[in-house]
Amino acid sequence: MSRIRHVRASRLAVTAATAALLAAALSPTAAGAAERPTRDQAVENAAVALARQAGALGLTAAQGTRVRDVIVDQDGSQHVRYDRTYRQLPVLGGDFVVHLAPDGTYRGVSRATRGTLSLPSVTPLLSAPTAADHAANSLRATRLGEALKRLTAKPELVVDALHGTPKLAWRTNAAALDGRGNPVARTVLTDARSGAQIDAWDTLESASGKGRSLYGGTVPLETTATGSSYQLTDPTRGGTYTGDAANRSDLCLLGTICVVRAPSTVFTDADNQWGDGTTTDRVSAAVDAQYGTDTTWDYFHDVHGRNGIAGDGKGSYNRVHYGTRYANAFWDDTCFCMTYGDGDGTNMGPLVSLDITGHEMAHGVTSKTAALTYSGESGGLNESTSDIFGTLVEFHAGNGSDKGDWLIGEKVVREGFGREALRYMDRPSHDGLSADCWTATAGSLDVHYSSGIGNHFAYLLAEGSGAKAINGVAHDSDTCDGSTVKGIGRAKLGAIWYRALTVYMTSSTDYAGARTATLKAAGDLYGADSAEYAAVGAAWSAVNVG
């Protein structure tokens, strides 16, 4: 279960003179000081701050910025997130968040990287076709000799500031179809001067009518009447809809030029009663996907005040019945959509359970906020973020047929899978692969296994250590340092993690950075001398993040 992201940026064009004029125009008056700033005002305030702090922030005439996200707190404090370019090239690790007081004055900044951003040249010595060949070979190597079809690799020139001294690099998205016609993909970062591989990571990994779903029983659905029938399109949640991919796969993914994208024909129904709750009816999986999207939208809206994935009120769409025996699900920024396979029929059924749909939609939220890089420890945090919110969505739904627990994908696995869930947040190592505790080698693990550290922290912070039953499911969580941790509840975990993600985390945040970000968030929400603040520190220490 994964996400991909594509960043564009534009040049910062605020001169010192403009900044002075803006500062005069934006100085609060006694009459207006109590008014909460709008999003546009926050962006203007941040522009003034950037112009004044350009030297301290290392911004030069060669660099450009573009606003990615804006958070305005209830007290009027503002947090404006930027992406950065260098000589019009995207900068990996160039993102930062400007923090402002309620009156618009500068408080500080959270940066993904702090080094000086300067290159002698942006002309590559390594050609784009050679970079594409490197990425294609890297993808082939991960498939253990399996024959791949329709392999494409599209290089993009970037500045890599994530891996030490900034350097010119090719970021290449390689994608192909495996022997069954299902997509596989890998992103490879190559030094554009020496040709050395800098990093690589897999990028497609895993999880009002009425509808009878596969996993959630009979569920409510908001649909759209069209003449004498209904479409599975929700006008109350930004036009989110679910379509049938007809077991076809894309011929392009991850930013490559799309020759054909798998079709997604919107489901329709004559009487607004959808599905029969079985896999033989293709509509039933669509009911789960649409219900899961609706429920996740409601969770982020009702609990965190977020209006859709990007915070702009616009809906995404779902594709179900994707590929052939495709045992995966993924979020894709290029289509702003979520895609679900039917499973292999032996180990897994259709991957449309509530926690998986919440997981995939949360990848979209991450891509529009912190954009955690999908490799190393930040990649583990990216996956952990989706597991955390997918779990909180499941609890928030209050669905009697799929009660909340700290297992991931327990509804989709079948007897042949060999265990009762894809992942276990109370004891991640129970899957035989994931890490319970941080070590110096955590960043070398697959992101789905290093995510166990964040998952373990989240469980301990919410529920505490020791054995207990939650909604009839046995949970038992030890600590890595032998301590006893008292939980502060799921609602406070969600509030702290969401604020940390949207206000303090950046693309390069690692586990030590996540500790700092969540402590800042807890201090903002509950006070630096609060029990909640202390609990965050104790839970991180309990997973060896000190």
Image: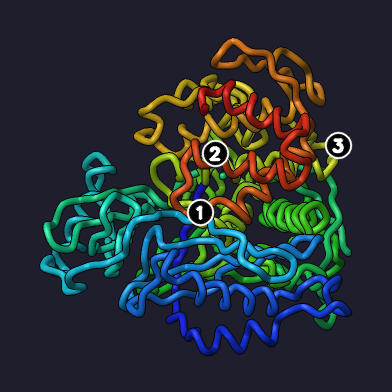
Marks 3/2: CA–CA distance: 25 Å
Crowding at label 2, few (<14), some or many (≥20) Cα neighbours within 10 Å? some
Left/right placement of residue 42 relative to residue 147 reads right
**In 3D space, how far apart are the residues under numbered discs 1 and 3 (Cα atoms)?**
37 Å
Q: Determine the residue positioned at 60% across, 45% down.
A: 386
What residue sits right under mark 2 in the picture? 345
For residue 155, which quarter of the picture?
A: bottom left
Dot 2 or dot 1, earlier in sequence:
2
User: Does 480 appear above or below 134?
Assistant: above
Q: Looking at the image, which is closer to me, 523 or 457?
A: 523
Q: Earlier in the sequence, mark 3 or mark 2?
A: 2
471 sits left or right of 114 in the view: right
Tell me if residue 506 comes above or below residue 243 in the rendering.
Answer: above
The residue where tag 3 is placed is: 400
Please tell me which residue is depicted at 27% across the width and 67% down the height of the picture: 118
Please name the amino acid that badge 2 sits on. Gly
Which amino acid type corresponds to the residue marked 3 in the rendered image?
Answer: Gly
Give amino acid for label 1: Thr
Which secondary structure, mark 1? loop
Contact (Cβ within 8 Å) of mark 2 with mark 1: no
| Residue 439 rendering spot, x and y as whole percentages | 42, 25
Helix or strand or loop: what does disc 2 sit on? loop
Characterize the local packing of mark 3: few (<14), some (14-19) or many (20 or more) Cα atoms within 10 angstroms.
few
For marks 1 and 3, the one nearer the N-term is: 3
In front: label 2 or label 1? 1
- Identify the residue shown where x is 71% and y is 57%: 293
* Residue 489 coordinates in the image, percent (x, y): 79, 32
- Rounded to the nearest angstrom, the CA distance separating label 2 from label 1 is 39 Å
Does residue 148 appear in this view?
A: yes
